Image: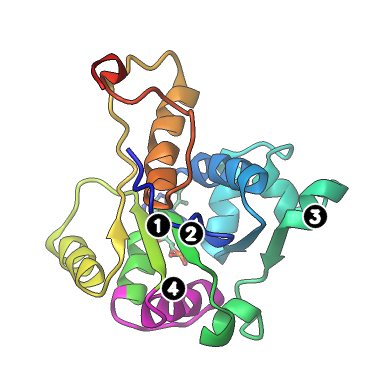
Amino acid sequence: MLNRESVIPARVLIGVTGASGAVYADRLLEILAEKIERVYLVVTNAGEKVVKHELSAESLLLRSLSGSLGKLEKGVIRTFGVDDLFAPCASGTSAPDAMVVTPCSMGTLSRIASGNSGNLLERSADVVLKQRRKLLICPRETPLNLIHLRNMTALVEAGAEMIPMMPGFYQKPKDINALVDFCVGKILEQLSIPHDLYKPWNSRMR
Ligand SMILES: Cc1cc2nc3c(=O)[nH]c(=O)nc-3n(C[C@H](O)[C@H](O)[C@H](O)COP(=O)(O)O)c2cc1C
């Protein structure tokens, strides 16, 4: 499942937009905060509204936004305002090892695809691409129009990886958490971070 020679990233930026699916970002944040050295967080203005609509105030994501993290969490998670263009991740000299935009709206996706960096999330994605680091885009929209598809193609051509938030059902998920973990596991695999969110398919035959 994992490329054993890949290096686990130490510093990962999570970008959260106004697409539905804040729970994906919240779960990814929980797991990365346990497994890596530093997690940066940038949430768009629309993202903040959707996060508040979809998550409870106790979620790690909302506590990160409201500045009410515990001491240990504070040591790992750094939240930057979406207009803070002086943040380290706005420059190639301080680019994170990898960036994950989840959930990614079609609006942010189009702006990254066209290099139209109007906020810290979009600028950071632009930096990650130009520095040839890993950029994982996790779009959430359906149905997709031709503009969406063309923007996705442009991003993949530029070096990004497209990981649509599309849970599979062959693992017979027991609840919504299992569906979320399926999608988050796909992100972790592309980051070369081992996880046990689900069993590999047919592991007895390995
Ligand atoms: C409740 C809610 C759910 C939304 N879900 C999606 C979605 O799944 N995908 C999408 O592309 N836009 C979705 N939108 C629209 C985006 O929030 C909107 O296009 C916004 O301008 C995106 O801004 P951003 O890319 O800066 O975050 C949703 C909006 C709301 C209020």
Q: Is residue 147 left or right of residue 206?
A: left
Tell me what residue is drawn at x 38 percent, y 59 percent: 136
Which residue matches tag 4?
125
* Residue density around tag 3, few if under 14, some if 14–19, many if 20 or more, within 10 Å: some
Q: Using the numbered discs, state the Cα–Cα distance from disc 1 to disc 3 in whole angstroms.
A: 25 Å
Disc 2 and disc 3 in contact, CB within 8 angstroms: no
Where does the C terminus fall, quadrant-wise? top left
**Which mark, by number, is residue 17?**
2
Q: Does mark 2 have its CB less than 8 Å from ligand 1?
A: yes
The amino acid type, in three-letter code, at marker 3 is Lys
Disc 1 and disc 2 in contact, CB within 8 angstroms: yes
Which residue matches tag 1?
104
Disc 4 and disc 3 in contact, CB within 8 angstroms: no
Question: Relative to 112, is 167 above or below?
Answer: above
Residue 182 pos. (x, y %): 39, 31
Q: Earlier in the sequence, mark 2 or mark 3?
A: 2
Q: Magenta stretch: residue 196 in it? A: no
Question: Relative to 57, is 182 above or below?
Answer: above
Q: Does mark 4 have its CB less than 8 Å from ligand 1?
A: no
Which residue matches tag 3?
74
Q: Using the numbered discs, state the Cα–Cα distance from disc 4 to disc 1 in whole angstroms.
A: 12 Å
Q: Using the numbered discs, state the Cα–Cα distance from disc 2 to disc 3 in whole angstroms.
A: 22 Å
Q: Using the numbered discs, state the Cα–Cα distance from disc 1 to disc 2 in whole angstroms.
A: 6 Å
Q: Residue furthest right?
A: 71
* Residue density around tag 4, few if under 14, some if 14–19, many if 20 or more, within 10 Å: many
Question: Relative to 183, is 156 above or below?
Answer: below
Task: Identify the secondary structure beneath mark 4.
Answer: helix
